[in-house]
Amino acid sequence: MTRLSPFKRLPRDEAGTSGIEFALTAPFVILLFLGGVTLYDLMRSYNKIVESNGIVADIVARQMTMDDAIFTKTYGAFANLQADKTMPNALRVTSVVWKDGKYTVDWTRKAGTTALLPEQKLDSTTLPAIPAGDSVIFVEGITQYTAIASIFGLGTVTYSETAFTRPRFTSSVKGL
């Protein structure tokens, strides 16, 4: 019986190949999984700001008047709907009327970390066409969110979203 040298047996020996294949592919599979989870997490948090802006617009549109007590409760609902309640957020609700051929602010309310809110832009790129004397409720919400995979360098993301709606029971919601 002839013994082969270890160097001649090595190319024929298949023991341990599945372990090596696993070691080579596992990091890619894990990164793909974490990427999918992170993408889902970011989309879910973005959908929360879109949903909460729509809910705030609907709440305000059902009011006849907007005072500080109603707005405080409305901001509370907005803040509770965010994906991460510990991160800063801000809300601005504005009643906009079409008067003298231009958009005019009837009243506005802000709450939260208002420094996050950008300068308000009221023109045809942000608002719909409305008849003279009518109004729309313009809601601007902004929040920050830190994704699950922030350990990989994806830091805090800031989401800013707008919504608008017409008042339901009157031509304009009166501000007090």
Image: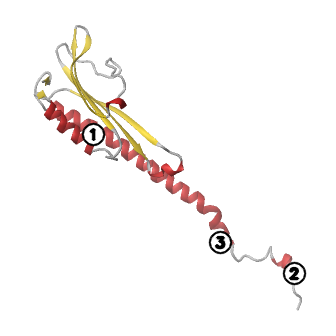
Horizontal arrangement in the rendering, residue 123 relative to residue 8 (left or right) = left
Q: Amino acid at mark 3?
A: Ser
Q: Is residue 91 above or below residue 86?
A: above
**Circle 1: is it few (<14), some (14-19), or many (20+) Cα within 10 Å?**
many
Residue lying farthest to the right in this orientation = 2
Question: Looking at the picture, does residue 114 appear above or below residue 9?
Answer: above
Mark 2 Cα within 10 Å, few/some/many (few <14, many 20+)?
Answer: few
Looking at the image, is mark 1 or mark 3 earlier in the sequence?
A: 3
Q: Secondary structure at mark 3?
A: helix
Q: CA distance from mark 3 to mark 2?
A: 24 Å
What SS does tag 1 mark?
Answer: helix
- Residue topped by disc 2: 5
Quadrant placement of the C terminus: top left
Mark 2 or 1 closer to N-term? 2
Residue 64: quarter of image:
top left
Which residue is at the far bottom? 1
CB atoms of marks 3 and 2 within 8 Å: no
Residue on which the image places disc 3: 18
Q: Quadrant of residue 160?
A: top left
Where residue 128 sits, quadrant-wise, is top left
Residue 42 position, x and y percent, is 42, 45
Q: Tell me what residue is drawn at x 29 percent, y 40 percent.
A: 51
Residue 174 in the image: above or below residue 43 = above
Q: Which residue is mark 1?
A: 52
Count how many numbered circles sit on residues in the image.
3
Residue type, numbered disc 1 = Ser
* Upstream in sequence: badge 3 or badge 2: 2
Above or below, comparing residue 137 to residue 90 in the picture: above
